């Protein structure tokens, strides 16, 4: 079968045209030729074409959100009062201070801090006439909310801070002033009450002490009347002296009786102490013994044990002294056994009496009678001493109790006088500042909230657009597809969205030129092949693959290539219906009976033939086999230069995957607003069957995207056919059955090529 090949000069012209009018990707904002991730590219991809909407909506929403942020809150005003409670109040009379330690004072201040926020103080504060004077109704103020905005601080020292925060500066000042006034009134009332209670208690104690002192004076006077004097010390001392003399005389008489014993037993019966009364030597021995006993006792009190050398030495000295005393007593008794009269002492004279007779020459009976008198006198005097001593102790105790009562009375009287004097001067509490009306806000968040609201409003539309783009993941621009699939599938061309009724000759001519460009790209990429077969498919129905197939067929035929268009979509049969060949045998029959049964028909365009889907009800798609497709394509390549196969979408067609394995290239059509996941799935399925993807065509591009992405200078330089332009301007309704794209190509084809 004869073949018509493209002249070399025509291919060279196609290469020159390619360098000028091919889709551009470099230099576009957000392009990432290295394939790396770029946040800017991602953001630009979702905002591309929507910048104006995002900016306008952002500005409007920023103003709205800033206004709402400004109005959502009010400035906060703070009024403060400073109350000083002195550690001690000024004293009229020096005395003991009320607070004995700083800890007690700090505990008191903490209690005052808590008391200011009590329900009692706040209730009194809300009854202050100052509220009505400033235009507020205190009955409408909830006490819980009133307490919530109140702060009382104590940071040590003598000062309490009363702080109130409110959006109304006058309200804050009124609140602080009324609270301070209520607290001062409460404090002074409690202080006055405490003072009155203390004064009353002191006065009662003073009256009791005066009465006790009067009773004590009466008792002392009654006791003094018994002796005719207020003091009995002289009587007591005289009685004690008399008792001492009587006891001394009694001892002397007993010694005399012992010495007058005719048998000498009296001297032997004298004790060392009795001998010491009239014998100087014994008196010295007795003094030494007492000294040694005292030293031994002191050593024991110091903790020295019985085996200590000093204790042992002291005991030896004491024993030696005791031995000397006993030896002297024996010698004294032996020496004075016959001469007792020389040793009889003289009779002491009782107090208040003349000197008595000497005891020398007295008989034993006289001495015994004298001893009996002294014993009776000793008993009487001893009773007098005991009586006077008890009375003396009683009166001393009464005087001590009286002195104690008098001292306490003096202190109570002084305290009463001090409290009376101090009640007339300023107390411990003083108000240093009383809550002035604030002129400037303490905290104003309106600017911050307005700024935050403005920023949120400014970027919210853009964020919403980006979020919607991330969720939907659609191809809105040709640049989205070229960037997303860069390095995987080349972009063959871009086709604009054309209306159903063509009225713009320039748009129609541009669409036709882009279609021819796609054809040139396919021819350049497949040099060296005598015949080439392409599968026209898409990921989903409605993306324009059939129109692209029909239009490319016209372009290849116009370029001089013998072209066959095959409808392998046994279910949709869109190409067959477009050429109105529903009842003619074709692809189905070739699948059933082999390549020899393949039938194709002339389209009316030179070098362009059509193989319809054949007579099929859609269930024949299951009968399409890989072997039959391979044989059919091999046979057809003997007849045609270019074979364009139209099939169903990859994700919904059985025959498309079978055909894709045996064609020289697959042209994937991607329409605007197509979902990226579906395109990715379609590509993965093509890769799974080892199909060669020749490239992709972005279809239904918006006018701005089309003009921006395609080298417009080369399109404007295309000479316009006046007759075609006039036809388009008159409004051409599609007659091809494939839409405006095929009509544009057919309209701008040379007249000789259209029959």
Image (cartoon, rainbow, N blue to C red):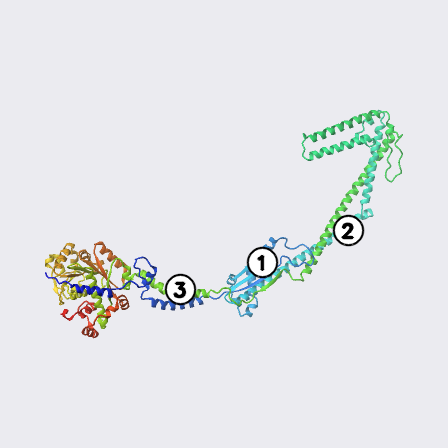
Mark 1, residues whose alpha carbon is within 10 Å: few (<14), some, or many (≥20)?
some
Question: Tag 1 or tag 3, which sits nearer the N-term?
Answer: 1
The answer to whether marks 3 and 2 mark residues whose Cβ atoms lie closer than 8 Å is no
Residue identifier under label 3: 456
In this rendered view, identify the residue nearer to me: 66 or 201.
Answer: 66
Q: Kindly report which numbered mark, 3 or 1, lies closer to the viewer in this rendering.
A: 3
Q: Kindly report which numbered mark, 3 or 2, lies closer to the viewer in this rendering.
A: 3
Which percent across, then down, holds residue 219? 77, 49
Question: Tag 2 or tag 3, which sits nearer the N-term?
Answer: 2
Q: CA distance from mark 2 to mark 1?
A: 51 Å
Residue identifier under label 2: 218
Quadrant of image for the N terminus:
bottom left
Question: 243 above or below 436?
Answer: above
Q: Name the image quarter holding residue 458.
A: bottom left
Q: Name the image quarter holding residue 527.
A: bottom left
Secondary structure category for the residue under label 1? helix
Q: Name the image quarter holding residue 5.
A: bottom left
Residue identifier under label 1: 112
Mark 3, residues whose alpha carbon is within 10 Å: few (<14), some, or many (≥20)?
some
């Amino acid at each position: 079968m004869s073949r018509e090949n493209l002249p070399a000069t025509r291919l060279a012209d196609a290469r020159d045209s390619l360098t000028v009018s091919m889709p551009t990707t470099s230099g576009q904002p957000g392009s990432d030729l290295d394939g790396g991730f770029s946040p800017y590219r991602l953001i630009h991809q979702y905002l591309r074409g929507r910048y104006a909407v995002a900016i306008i909506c952002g500005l409007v929403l920023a103003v709205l959100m800033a206004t709402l942020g400004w109005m959502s809150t009010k400035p906060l005003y703070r009024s403060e009062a400073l109350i000083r409670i002195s550690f001690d109040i000024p004293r009229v009379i020096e005395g003991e201070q009320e607070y004995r330690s700083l800890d007690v004072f700090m505990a008191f201040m903490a209690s005052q801090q808590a008391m200011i926020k009590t329900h009692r103080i706040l209730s009194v504060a809300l009854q202050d006439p100052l509220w009505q004077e400033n235009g507020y109704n205190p009955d409408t103020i909830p006490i819980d909310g009133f307490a919530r905005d109140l702060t009382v601080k104590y940071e040590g020292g003598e000062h309490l801070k009363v702080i109130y925060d409110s959006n109304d500066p006058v309200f804050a000042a009124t609140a602080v002033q009324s609270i301070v006034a209520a607290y001062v009134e409460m404090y002074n009332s409690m202080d006055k009450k405490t003072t009155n209670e203390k004064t009353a208690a002191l006065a009662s104690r003073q009256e009791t002490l005066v009465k006790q002192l009067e009773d004590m004076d009466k008792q002392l006077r009654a006791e003094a009347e018994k002796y005719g004097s207020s003091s009995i010390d002289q009587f007591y001392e005289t009685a004690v002296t008399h008792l001492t003399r009587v006891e001394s005389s009694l001892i002397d008489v007993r010694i005399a009786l012992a010495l007058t014993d005719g048998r000498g037993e009296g001297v032997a019966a004298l004790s060392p102490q009795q001998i010491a009364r009239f014998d100087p030597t014994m008196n010295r021995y007795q003094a030494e013994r007492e000294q040694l006993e005292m030293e031994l006792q002191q050593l024991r009190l110091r903790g020295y044990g019985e085996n200590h050398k000093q204790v042992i030495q002291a005991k030896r000295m004491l024993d030696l002294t005791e031995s000397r005393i006993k030896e002297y007593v024996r010698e004294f008794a032996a020496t004075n056994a016959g001469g007792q009269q020389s040793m009889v002492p003289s009779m002491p004279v009782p107090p208040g009496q003349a000197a008595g007779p000497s005891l020398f020459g007295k008989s034993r009976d006289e001495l015994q009678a004298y001893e009996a008198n002294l014993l009776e006198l000793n008993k009487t005097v001893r009773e007098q001493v005991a009586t006077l001593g008890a009375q003396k102790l009683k009166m001393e105790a009464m005087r001590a109790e009286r002195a104690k009562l008098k001292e306490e009375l003096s202190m109570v009287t002084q305290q009463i006088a001090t409290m009376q004097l101090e009640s007339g001067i300023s107390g411990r509490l003083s108000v240093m500042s009383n809550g002035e009306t604030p002129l400037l806000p303490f905290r104003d968040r309106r600017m911050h909230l307005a700024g935050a609201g403005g920023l949120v409003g400014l970027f919210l539309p853009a964020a919403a657009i980006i979020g919607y783009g991330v969720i939907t993941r659609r191809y809105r621009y040709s640049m989205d597809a070229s960037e997303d699939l860069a390095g995987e599938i080349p972009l063959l061309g871009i086709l604009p969205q054309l209306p159903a009724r063509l009225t713009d000759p320039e748009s129609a001519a541009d669409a036709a030129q882009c279609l021819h460009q796609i054809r040139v790209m396919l021819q350049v990429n497949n040099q060296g092949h005598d015949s080439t077969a392409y599968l026209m498919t898409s990921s989903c129905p409605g993306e324009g693959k059939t129109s692209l197939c029909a239009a490319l067929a016209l372009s290849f035929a116009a370029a001089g290539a013998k072209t066959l268009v095959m409808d392998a979509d046994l279910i949709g049969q869109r190409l067959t219906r477009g050429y109105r060949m529903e009842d003619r045998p074709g692809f189905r029959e070739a699948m059933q009976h082999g390549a020899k049964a393949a039938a194709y028909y002339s389209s009316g365009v030179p070098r362009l033939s059509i193989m319809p889907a054949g007579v099929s009800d859609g269930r024949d798609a299951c009968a399409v086999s890989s072997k039959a497709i391979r044989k059919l394509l091999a046979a057809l390549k003997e007849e045609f230069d270019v074979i364009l196969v139209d099939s169903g979408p990859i994700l919904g067609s059985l025959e498309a995957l079978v055909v894709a394995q045996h064609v020289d290239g697959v042209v994937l059509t991607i329409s605007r607003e197509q979902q990226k996941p579906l395109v990715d799935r379609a590509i993965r399925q093509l890769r799974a069957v080892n199909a060669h993807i020749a490239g992709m065509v972005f279809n239904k591009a918006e006018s701005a995207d089309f003009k921006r992405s395609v080298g417009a200078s080369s399109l404007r330089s295309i000479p316009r056919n006046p007759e075609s332009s006039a036809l388009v301007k008159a409004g051409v309704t599609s007659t091809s059955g494939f839409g405006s794209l095929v009509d544009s190509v057919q309209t701008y084809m040379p007249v000789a090529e259209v029959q």
